[in-house]
């Protein structure tokens, strides 16, 4: 079942009527939703919107004062751009929409509609947008309600313009902080929110690593003595999660190899092992009894593994493919 696009809510984000019409025209033109809706009302036209969601179900015994639940989604990778944003953005749009299928906004909308009926809060662990555009930021403002919280992903920092050089280092992010602070209602580097006595701590670790000021802030949260759930984009890799990552992304044409073979660390995992602040933080977390769970994304696959004696790390698959997980807490 498809729902009509609710573009009229763009009014609440400061559009003049004239701009709104232009913007709405832009959205209609680029999101591809209405044309899909006209020709082919749904991925599975005979199934309801809820049935199109690919949901996993997890439970965390955190010591909540009252039971509650969240929908955890990640990696929606919105690829909207207004034509007036220029040729570079439209080229990025045309290229990246092919990567992510063109139904990302629909997937997000269905997920949030399901969440409204079924859970208390929504957690988004980053890559809500695929790259920075006015149209994407308008969608962020439109969809990020007060019952939603989360963290940034690496794609929140990208422009996908031809001159962009990705460094995977902190200074790369500096240009983006003001933009992200303006677009997202959560602090993009560190935020904490207590729900029924459980402290959800969202940190930016989008290049795999954390920074000393974030570790200090985390320790200040830990001093409150509440059970904690760490929410972030890139998982803190453990053996099975790294294996699954490499099986999916690197060795996708191979069957499972001997269990004794652990793929070499590279990328985010290598940075986590080599960066002292991050490796010390991970070592501390493994002994932190207040840590009851970790919720992450980035990998586009659903995988989980015990992280510490008190916490399991749950990685959720890509929301652009209609994935999400309900996490219940007691
Ligand atoms: Fe990512």
Image (cartoon, rainbow, N blue to C red):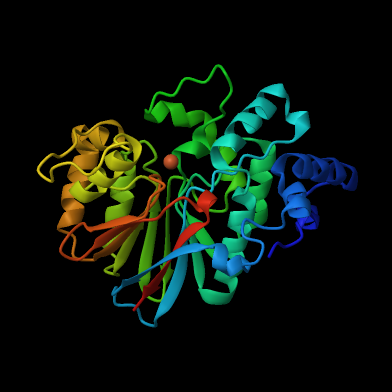
- Res 11 visible: yes
Picture mark count: 0
Classify the position of the N terminus by image quarter.
bottom right
Q: Is residue 8 above or below residue 265?
A: below
Residue 51 image-quadrant placement: bottom right
**Residue 43's spot in the image, x, y percent?**
62, 56
- Res 212 visible: no
Classify the position of the C terminus by image quarter.
bottom left
Q: Residue at x 29, y 48 (%)?
A: 216
Viewer-closest of 184 and 315 = 315
User: Which residue reaches farthest top?
Assistant: 163
Relative to 218, is 309 on the left or the right? left
Q: Is residue 8 above or below residue 118?
A: above
Relative to 229, is 147 on the left or the right? right
User: Which residue reaches farthest left?
Assistant: 260
Residue 81 image-quadrant placement: top right
Viewer-closest of 128 and 180 = 128
**Residue 259's spot in the image, x, y percent?**
13, 46
Q: Residue at x 72, y 53 (%)?
A: 40
Relative to 44, is 27 on the left or the right? right
**Residue 108's spot in the image, x, y percent?**
59, 56
**Residue 159's spot in the image, x, y percent?**
57, 29
Q: Residue at x 47, y 20 (%)?
A: 165
User: Which residue reaches farthest bottom?
Assistant: 66
User: Which residue reaches farthest right?
Assistant: 18
**Whereabouts is ligand 1, in terms of quadrant?**
top left
Q: Is residue 29 above or below residue 33?
A: above
């Amino acid at each position: 079942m498809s729902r009509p696009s609710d573009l009229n809510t763009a009014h609440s984000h400061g559009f003049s009527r004239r701009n709104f019409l232009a913007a709405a025209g832009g959205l209609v033109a680029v999101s591809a939703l209405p044309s899909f809706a006209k020709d082919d009302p749904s991925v599975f036209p005979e199934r309801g919107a809820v049935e199109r969601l690919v949901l996993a179900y997890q439970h965390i015994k955190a010591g909540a004062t009252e039971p509650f639940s969240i929908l955890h989604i990640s990696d929606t990778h919105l690829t909207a751009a207004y034509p007036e944003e220029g040729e570079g953005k439209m080229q990025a749009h045309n290229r990246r929409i092919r990567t992510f299928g063109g139904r990302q906004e629909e997937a997000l909308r269905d997920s949030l509609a399901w969440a409204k009926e079924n859970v208390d809060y929504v957690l988004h662990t980053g890559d809500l947008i695929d790259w920075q555009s006015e149209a994407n930021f308008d969608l962020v403002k439109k969809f990020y309600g007060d019952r939603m919280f989360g963290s940034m992903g690496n794609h929140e920092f990208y422009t996908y313009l031809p001159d962009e050089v990705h460094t995977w280092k902190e200074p790369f992010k500096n240009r983006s902080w003001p933009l992200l602070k303006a677009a997202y209602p959560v602090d993009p580097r560190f935020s904490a929110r207590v729900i029924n006595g459980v402290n959800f701590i969202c940190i930016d670790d989008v290049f795999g690593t954390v920074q000393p000021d974030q570790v200090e802030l985390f320790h200040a949260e830990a001093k409150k003595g509440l059970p904690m759930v760490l929410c972030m984009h890139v998982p803190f890799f453990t053996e099975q999660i790294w294996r699954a990552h490499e099986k999916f992304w690197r060795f996708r044409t191979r069957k499972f190899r001997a269990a004794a073979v652990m793929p070499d660390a590279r990328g985010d995992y290598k940075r986590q092992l080599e960066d002292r602040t991050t490796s010390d933080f991970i070592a501390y977390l493994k002994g932190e009894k207040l840590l009851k769970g970790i919720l992450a994304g980035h990998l586009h696959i659903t995988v989980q593994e015990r992280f510490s004696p008190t916490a399991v790390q749950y990685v959720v698959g890509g929301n652009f493919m209609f994935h999400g997980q309900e996490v219940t807490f007691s």
